[in-house]
Image (cartoon, coloured by chain):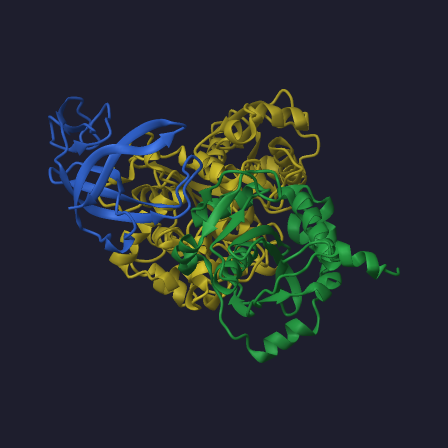
Amino acid sequence: MRIDMELERYLRPPDREMPPYPAKVITLATGSKMVVRQVFREDVPAILPAVRPTLDIPRDYYDVVGSRVYAELLAWYRYRYRDVFCIIGQIDGLLVGLVNSRMFSPQLGISLHTLAIERGLRIGAHLFAAKMEHHIEYLGQEEVLITAESPIGFRRWMIEYGLELREGQHELGGAAPYALTREMYFDAKHRLVAGERPVPQELMEVAQREIRVASETDIIEKILGARRREIL
Amino acid sequence: MITAYKCKACGQMMYPYHYRCIKCGAREFDKVAPSDSAKLLTYTIIEQLPWGFDERGRVLGVIEFTNKVRAMALIDVDADRDEVKLGMKLSVHWEPVRDDYGEKVYGIVCRPA
Amino acid sequence: MKPVVIAGAGMIAFERRDDDSLVDMLAMASLRAMDDAGLGDHPVDAVIVGNMASGLFNHQVSVASALVDKLSLYPAAAERIENGPASGGSAIKHGYQAIASGMADVVLVAGGEKMREVIGPRATDVVAYMAQPEAEYVYGVSLPAMAGMFARLYMKKYGVTAKHLAQVAIKNQANGLLNPYAHIHMKITMEGILTHPDSVVSNPIVADPLRLYDCCPVSDGAAAVVMTTPEIAKTLSSKPPIEVAGIGQATDTHALHEREDPTDLKAVRIAAEKAFAMARCAPQDVHVAELHDAFTILEIAESEHVGFFEKGEGAKALANGVTSLDGHLPINPSGGLKARGHPVGATGVAQAVELVWQLRGEAGERQVRDAVNAFMVNFGGFGNNVVATVLRRES
């Protein structure tokens, strides 16, 4: 499809310069090494197939979160969403989860979504922590606004981080906005932020070579934990 | 503050109330007020509280008052949980330990003495 | 008393089962046990359901009557037995009593719980209702918190280390990988849960010193057995009936702080002694055991309290592989509560189902060789109501 660049000039938001998120590797309970790294606009087409199967999974609001993540990634890819960043988790190249977020102003971050594809390994918690790490430590922001669309998210973020309720609304609409401040982040960091840097070269090469995505059936079964239901 | 019960027959100290002594089965007791200091017998730092609490975690312990009454208690150490040690001396207070949708529920709260 | 056997055993996979109601799960597990027993159209005299909290989790009570209805087993007698996490073990005991007394010839005992209908912290709260209300519950104590307080003292007194606890978790999750009915199918490693610095986050503290992987998951599930007399069992099926050789039950103080020695699981000790006395055998005669490892520390402590090992030796036996699948006394070949999962009312029955399979040689990849005597502990409350059972393959 040809794009009318003359019109695009008016429609495309200008993007702010954002310092990069340095990749790290986290050791999971299984002993697996999860590479956590930032991905960019050009990586979006590789990621979308991992999000798509969640659109039909009502459990734990995967459908709501998944469809919004899908739309956010697509809008970012097609230049309709500004100052967005996305961090993914990969085990042996396989995409196991992702988080996205936005730099609203130099001081304020807006946390968008957390999507764990592999479950039961605290991947969502690790990736959410990485997102906060980026906002506070690398983008140098003062505060991140957070909301929750699932009870799991609500419990995890609000209570584990001890967030503060804020007036007004979060950009995603829905539930009340809560804030993570620099101070709260550094108080919680030792409990919630894991990982080592730099990522060993061989691990990084595997991660960068290809963002592998599990099959649609595998993704649904990972999320529903229903792999054995047919026989049992 | 709580009331403990001392068996008139065998001297066994009990809390909470039992209709029969947990040691000898007798049914008559003297009411005993716990002393205002205690020591810590065991504790845990509970990081994932049940529904009904908005805080992240708290220290719960089993204490023994100087007069040998034993009870569970909330150990209030503010931020410094590292200062909690088995056997430590505690001051004992009767304060809210739980908020039941706006209604304060009281219990034993201990602080390092 | 008449001898009593388990003629059939069955269960459904433990996991989060959004699509099945509690009674559906009980019915599915029951059909498996009934078919396994070769029951056909043979009448069932009584249906006993082990369940802790269907009213709270699922807004449904009288689930035993509901199960009779789902299975069209009228006019069978029906009761639900509630003994907290030992509801399943208690239900089997009641089945035993019904047959042994001659009041019933065939009893269906099913255990089940559907906990994932509520979110995790609510489930933790419901389970905490078994604590002493004014002296414990009010403080926000949870079962993991009680286990944490117990673990702190037990570890100090008997030299049990965080590494020992992690070894229980690793062993049981490895066993769970071989059990298609287990909730958790995940191999965990010492590096991942304990030695790597990231384990602070990957395996966070739940109730210090216990961490996430020291605790069983919250599960939905059901299991069932058909109990009858040896004579009737022989007419139903050619499978070897498994004798319920001994059952012991004991209670202890409700509040943890009222126990003279808080590291002594007196009810476990007494329940086991009674079960072994009734079965006329000793802990040394046991070939395979299912212990109630809702928390890793409990597997070690129970293995000592029931008499498998001296106090302080349980952790060493574990570390030396004695309790591994290929060890001298395999403990929790099913993966235990840790990996199979712990739908509270189902657990005691699921332990019996696993042991029936082990004694018959039907346990597949996790089969323990030549087991004749099997033993289980179903631990209710925080050890204030415990049922121990000896099952035996008839020789």
Q: Is residue C106 left or right of residue C210?
A: right
Check the rendered structure and report the hue given to chain C: yellow
Depth check, front residue: C182 or A122: A122
| Residue A125, position as x, y percentages in the image | 52, 55
The quadrant of the rendering that contains the N terminus of chain A is: bottom right
For residue C334, say whether it is visible.
Answer: no
Q: Looking at the picture, how far across and down is residue C362, in whole percent?
A: 61, 53
Chain identifier, green in the render: A
Along the viewing direction, whichever of B71 and C265 lies nearer the viewer: B71
- Tell me the colour chain B is drawn in: blue
Answer with the quarter of the image where residue A86 lies: bottom right
Front-lying residue, B4 or A172: A172
The residue at 34%/58% (across/down) is: C309
State the residue lying farthest toward the top.
Answer: C75
Left or right of residue A51: residue C162: left
Q: C278 or A204, which lies in front? A: A204
